[in-house]
Image (cartoon, rainbow, N blue to C red):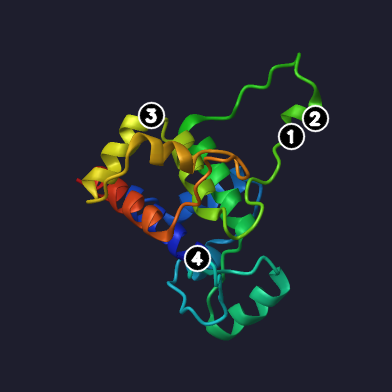
């Protein structure tokens, strides 16, 4: 799955208006016009995406100059990893409010670092941030997967949330994201 597709599916699942998508990106620290958002919400073709030979999934390169050039040809604004992460951070704030800062914490610990380290952990980050944004427990997530027709054990779900490099870490596949977003859509669009 590419980042535009993930963004489109999240927007559909929660019936988010384009003006709210603009606000969510602003909350995440990125500015986009309504026209840019409309172009971002067009489902792109797989052309211009790179294929990860290890997993067989397609991903958008994080090279913004390259993605902007190809976007002009397609009239599609491609969503790179930083943009998707900004949307997810904004979605957390949109749903839960601004995080209260503890003045006793050092400033360095208050700054957020980018969770998307490479193109292989995008799906894991999406699951983690949606879990936070929606205040979901593991049982809630398992129920959402089940609603969409996927069955995961608690251990398998836990492995998706492990830190990359941990011995029990498991890379989330595109099918995990598709089932989870389908389950969210089924749950929230009733």
Residue, disc 4 = 55
Badge 4: residue crowd in 10 Å (few <14, some 14–19, many ≥20): few
Of pointers 2 and 3, the one earlier in the residue sequence: 2
The answer to whether the residues at label 2 and label 1 have Cβ atoms under 8 Å apart is yes
Residue 188 lies in quadrant: top left
168 or 67: nearer the eye? 168
Of pointers 4 and 1, the one earlier in the residue sequence: 4
Frontmost of labels 1 and 3 is 3
**Circle on res. 108:** 2
**Circle on res. 111:** 1
Could you say where residue 62 lies in the image, as x and y percent from the top left? Answer: 67, 65
**Circle on res. 137:** 3
Badge 2: residue crowd in 10 Å (few <14, some 14–19, many ≥20): few
Frontmost of labels 2 and 3 is 3
Frontmost of labels 3 and 4 is 4
- Vertical side of 93 occupied by 177: above or below: below
Identify the element where label 1 is drawn.
loop
157 or 34: nearer the eye? 157
Q: In this view, does 41 lie to the left or right of 112?
A: left
Distance from the alpha carbon under mark 3 to that under mark 4? 28 Å
Distance from the alpha carbon under mark 4 to that under mark 1? 32 Å
Distance from the alpha carbon under mark 1 to that under mark 3? 25 Å
């Amino acid at each position: 799955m590419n980042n535009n597709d993930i963004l489109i599916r999240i927007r559909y699942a929660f019936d988010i208006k384009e003006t709210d998508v603009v606000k969510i990106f602003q909350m995440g620290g990125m500015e986009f016009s309504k026209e840019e958002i409309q172009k971002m919400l067009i489902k792109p073709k797989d052309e211009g995406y790179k294929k990860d030979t290890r997993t067989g999934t397609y991903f958008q390169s994080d090279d913004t100059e390259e993605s902007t050039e190809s976007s002009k040809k397609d009239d599609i604004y491609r969503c790179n990893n930083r943009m998707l992460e900004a949307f997810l951070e904004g979605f957390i704030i949109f749903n839960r409010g601004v995080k209260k800062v503890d003045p006793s914490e050092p400033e360095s610990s208050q700054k957020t670092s980018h969770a998307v380290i490479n193109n292989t952990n995008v799906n894991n980050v999406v699951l983690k941030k949606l879990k936070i944004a929606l205040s979901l427990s593991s049982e809630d997530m398992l129920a959402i997967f089940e609603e969409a027709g996927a069955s995961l054990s608690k251990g398998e779900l836990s492995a998706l949330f492990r830190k990359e490099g941990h011995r029990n870490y498991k890379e989330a596949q595109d099918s995990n994201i598709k089932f989870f977003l389908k389950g969210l859509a089924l749950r929230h669009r009733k």
